[in-house]
Image: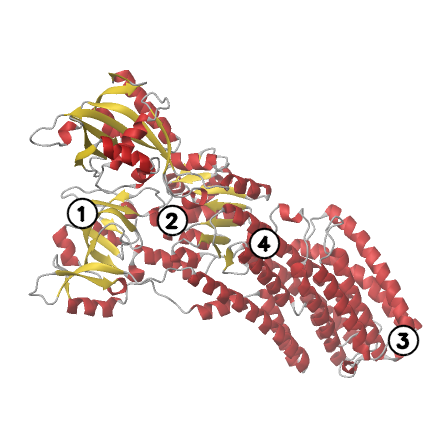
Amino acid sequence: MTRFPALRAHGDAPVLTLFRNLGSSPKGLTENEAAERLRRFGDNRIDGTDRAPVRVWAAARSPFVALLTALGVVFAGVGDIRGAVTVGVMVALSIGLRFWQQSRSERAISAVRDQITTTVTVRRRAAAEFPGSEREVPTADLVPGDVVLLGPGDVIPADVRIVAAKDFVVDQSALSGEALPVAKRAPQPGKHEEHELVETPALGFAGTSVVGGTATAVVAATGSETYFGALAKQSAEPRAESSFDAGVRRVGWTLVRFMLVMVPIVLVVNGTVTGDWAQAGMFAVAVAVGLTPEMLPVIVTTNLARGAAALSRRQVIVKRLNAIQDLAAMDVLCVDKTGTLTEDRIAYAHSVDYSGSPDGEAAEYAGLAVRFQTDRHDRLDEAIETLFDGEDDLVADALFTGVAEIGFDHARRRASVVVRRGSEHLLISKGDPDEILPRCGHARRDGVVTEFDDAARIGAEELVRAYAEHGMRVLAVAAREVSAGLGGFDETDENEMILVGFVGFVDPVRDGVVNAVKALGEQGVALKVLTGDNRHVAARVADSAGIPVGEVVLGRRVEAADDAELREIVKDTTVFAKLTPAHKARVVTALRENGCAVGFVGDGVNDVTALRTADVGIAPDTATDAAKEAADLVLLDRDLGVLARGVAEGRRTLGNTLKYVSITAASNFGNVLSVLAASAFLPFLPILPIQLVVSNLLYDLAQLALAWDRVDDEYLSRPRRWDARGLTGFMLVFGPLSSLFDLATFAVLWHVFGAGADPLLFQTGWFVEGLLSQLLVVLVLRGRGTSPRASRPVVLATAAAALVGLLVPLSPLAGPLRMQALPAGYLLWLVLVLAGYALAAHIAKRGYARRRAWW
């Protein structure tokens, strides 16, 4: 590993060289040295940044915002201040809504963080001539060169090099993904060992926790210079473009391309026909207005904010609003094993004799050993304790007395106790089968003790191997009677024992995981397991969760594959084991390069890179702060079923958003075609830019209610994305359809009502017809023929906007908007044209839906 060369060098250095390199001493730093280093290196905390500017930029970075900002500049350039102000208000409202939602999410996440100030025991000196003394200092005041003393329950506060240790065991699953604790020790003199950095026995890493034992260590790196800090920094780096970002960009450019094509055509046609290039310029501005949905960013943000509120009720905090629609597009979900598919605990599975037959004696003997074990209890011991209640303890205390103990260490990989019953002394040993089996000369089966011959030994070893291949942790239990000699008991008594049997343990699959995996599969989301744990455990958990296993790919194969090979590997592989953080990120990248929209669930610092690489990063609220900072969604409940419901909510949000985008873009394109046709024969503008802005504003305000609309069940059944190709096809079908009815209205206004000599009547007539037809077609096109009826908010908002549109020409606003009252006969025409348009749109919808995906 090329990163962190100084840290690796510290891990291999002799003790005296280590202290010399760090400018320290076994007696600790002096207070003056510590104060000077604190000024030089800064506080021992991950650098924080002011997130407000980042949130503002994230809220403003949208192609829709850029499009509207450009339109506002055009309005200002042609002197239409009212139009420029209207567009500016829409842009500010959109940015404000996004900033508010993201700030709200940040506050919610901060509320679930632990705010307790921690301290660490250090050895320091008042001055160079004084001996070192131990005292507590705030973790933030720790500096490189400090000598720290660590014990059970401590969180390692910085990257440290261990100089002395006794049975020192650390849980570093947040960094490596390894479920079980690992032993740490000082390097053995004259023995060079090659390890991955995180697996180096002499190094302890910031953020990991001490499970047992004690150690004296010297601080090698603090704050952002730690391994934890370097990974955490990646949470602040710009993330890759997500599927939502790419889709929005394509949709935005689709609208821009339509504008770039239509605006010059209108300008040239009108200027050539009329010779009035100033009026032609105003026509071109009207076209730009017509093609641009002014409230598009507000509508999209409102839908996302409503989706975020719905997800919050489902125990999901949304940090990045756009992630809701990335959730809708997600077709692959990558999950870690520990804590996501499993409960992250060790649980008793069963007890068997050496032949594999169920036999509770091994568990009973193990329980007796744990009862009289005064040394630390590991996770396996705790699982055994749960098997026995208070009555069992009373019986054990009444029948047995603890006499001696031969403690566990990672060299022996076993622990023994000696108990007395009457005049008999019984030694019970439990531990790694590789250590226990060679010390057994006999074995117990069906209550009968027989010789543990070669055939029985081979069978027992194969049984242990089979359990390991099924992902089980196995503890061997043996016993023998011993004599109480003058010298007491020692390791020589752990020979010629009787093998009682084996106790099996598993990390249980979480309740509801199987149903959640099934629900995600029915939604078109494939699950892949990416874990740092071993292949057997990963395969067993995946199979128990209902995930097809197939070939398990290990991290070394991911490391060896080039990008093209890895893209082929990830297509069919569902379980990856022994992965490093870099391996996880490469797998996620390969999936995305294959065209997948990828979600990633992770909770450790080792998951930060993959969380930032995925389309949507997801972390539980129990995750490290670095993981939550990198994530887009934070789960307050680790149940995957919550995520399955979140996927449906994301698709509902996307569906309601795309209803607006597609229908509005088609209607606006139809308006532009109508303007283009009118520009060939009208001596005046068919509608003024400010009238078009007001029409769009009334329409858009009504469409805010789409956030509460119903969505087809079929739409929720598979991943959905923003698709510019679908938008173009939709516009080309339904835009010209609306334009046909606009042209019919033009003809009636011109020939029946004499509006050719009255521009105000013509403009008012089209304003009303255009608004009502746009509102009506939303109700017609909002879903397939089997779509559930429109929700009450949508119906009420549509009716209210239509009523306002009919009353505007009769209101005091008619003057400023240059409108006039319409003839009563025109209202009859409105009823006819709207009925005809609704029927035609319904027929076209049925034909279109048969040939193309809806939305």
Q: Residues within 10 Å of mark 4 (few under 14, many from 20)?
A: many
* Residue 676 appears in the picture as rendered: no
In the rendered image, the vertical position of residue 334 relative to residue 468, given as above or below = below
- In the image shown, does 225 or 568 lie closer to the viewer? 225
The residue to which callout 1 is attached is 165
Q: Secondary structure at mark 4?
A: helix
Q: Earlier in the sequence, mark 3 or mark 1?
A: 1
**Mark 4 to mark 2: distance in Å?**
28 Å
Three-letter amino acid code at the position of disc 2: Pro
Which picture quadrant has residue 458? top left
Query: Looking at the image, which residue is at 86% across and 76% down?
Result: 822
Looking at the image, do the residues carrying marks 4 and 2 touch, with CB atoms under 8 Å apart? Answer: no
Query: Of discs 1 and 2, which sits in the foreground?
Result: 1
Name the image quarter holding residue 109. Answer: bottom left
Residues 853 and 165: in front is 165
Residue kind at label 4, given as amino acid type = Gly
Give left or right: position of 723 versus 820. Answer: left
Name the foreground residue: 854 vs 595.
854
Residue 141 sits in which quadrant?
bottom left
Mark 3 vs mark 1, foreground winner is 1
Q: To which residue does mark 4 refer?
A: 650
Q: Position of residue 427 (x, y in %)?
A: 19, 29
Mark 3 residue type: Pro
Pointer 3: what residue? 823
The residue at which mark 2 appears reads as 581
Q: Secondary structure at mark 3?
A: loop
